[in-house]
Image (tube, rainbow, N blue to C red):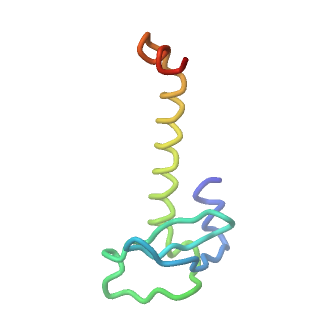
Amino acid sequence: MNLKELVINKIAKFAYCTDGALWYEVDGFRFPVPFAETVGACFMPEHKAINLMRWIRKQLEENAAQQRAQLSASSRPLTNQNKENNN
């Protein structure tokens, strides 16, 4: 899913609050809004997703970085030490 698909004519719904962040969801995609970034703002149970685009983008970028890291780790050739650990 890309940013445009998540924000154009979509509603973000509050999911839960934990670990210093408000978590919202758009079409099954969850993203955090850190408390430190909410000072002076009013966060409601529902918002136009485009108004939360900054945090949606951050989560998309983080997810992509994690996927790249997993791919590079899985495509690394096994060293002798890794081969011994896998047996």
Q: Which residue occupies the foreground of this view, 18 or 66? A: 18
Q: Residue at x 60, y 67 (%)?
A: 7
What residue is shown at x 48% (from left), y 28% (from top)?
Answer: 73
Where is residue 78 drawn, in percent x and y?
A: 49, 15
Relative to 18, say whether 70 is above or below.
Answer: above
Q: Nearer the viewer, residue 23 or 10?
A: 23
How far across and how far down the image is residue 86, in percent? 53, 21
Q: How many marks?
A: 0
**Residue occupying the far front of the picture:** 87
Q: Against 59, is 20 above or below?
A: below
**On the rendered structure, is 43 left or right of 25?**
left
Residue 23 at x, y percent in the picture: 51, 73
Q: Is 15 on the left-hand or right-hand side of 65? A: right
| Residue in the image at 44% along x and 66% along y | 54
Where residue 31 appears, as percent x and y from the top left, is 52, 65
Determine the residue located farthest toward the top in the rendered image. 80
Q: Pick the quarter of the image with the C terminus.
A: top right
Q: Residue 28, located in which quarter of the rendered image?
A: bottom right
Note whether 45 is above or below 3 in the view shown: below
Residue found at x 49% / y 20%: 76
Quarter location, residue 27 = bottom right
